[in-house]
Amino acid sequence: MNIQQAIEEGYEYCMAVGNEGILIHLTDALLEPGEYANNQLLLCEKEPRFHSIDAEDIENLLVEHLDNQEEFYSDESFAEATKGCDDLIKQLAEKMNENLGNRPFYFTTKIYLKY
């Protein structure tokens, strides 16, 4: 598929092979071929994905962190440290997911773009 076809089909981004994680807007790639012509470009999915975390994962991370501190070693888990914190942890997860909603990720497809 060429870059113009990808734009016409509603795609917005691609990534250079070996430089994953750095988005290239398709119009930039089209308008500046000298900048990207030496790279293999992989088309990104149309829809972004968003990182998220749930309250249970946050609680597990907190307990794991406490359990793994060597200076406070104990044979028993510190799970009781989060007792009564369910609502707070849920609020934290909601706020974090709200913040992460401002940070989209575009995964690559297996489609290579041509000029």
Image (cartoon, rainbow, N blue to C red):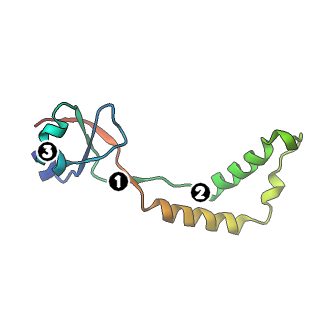
Please name which of the two marks, 3 or 1, marks the residue nearer to the observer: 3
Say the numbered circle drawn on residue 32. 3
Q: Are marks 3 and 1 in contact (CB under 8 Å)?
A: no
Mark 2: amino acid: Asp
10 Å neighbourhood of mark 2: few (<14), some, or many (≥20)? some
Image coordinates of residue 57 in percent, x first then y, are 64, 52
Q: Amino acid at mark 3?
A: Glu
Q: Are marks 3 and 2 in contact (CB under 8 Å)?
A: no
Instruction: Determine the secondary structure under disc 1.
Output: loop
What residue is shown at x 81% (from left), y 57% (from top)? 81
Q: Determine which residue is flagged by label 2.
A: 54
Residue 114 appears in the figure: yes
Disc 3 element:
loop
The residue shown at (13%, 35%) is 114
Structural distance between the alpha carbons of marks 3 and 2: 41 Å
Q: Which amino acid, mark 1? A: Pro
Look at 19% across and 37% down and name the residue there. 36
Name the side, left or right, on which 58 lies relative to 14.
Answer: right
The reply to whether residue 1 is in sight is no
As drawn, the label of residue 48 is 1
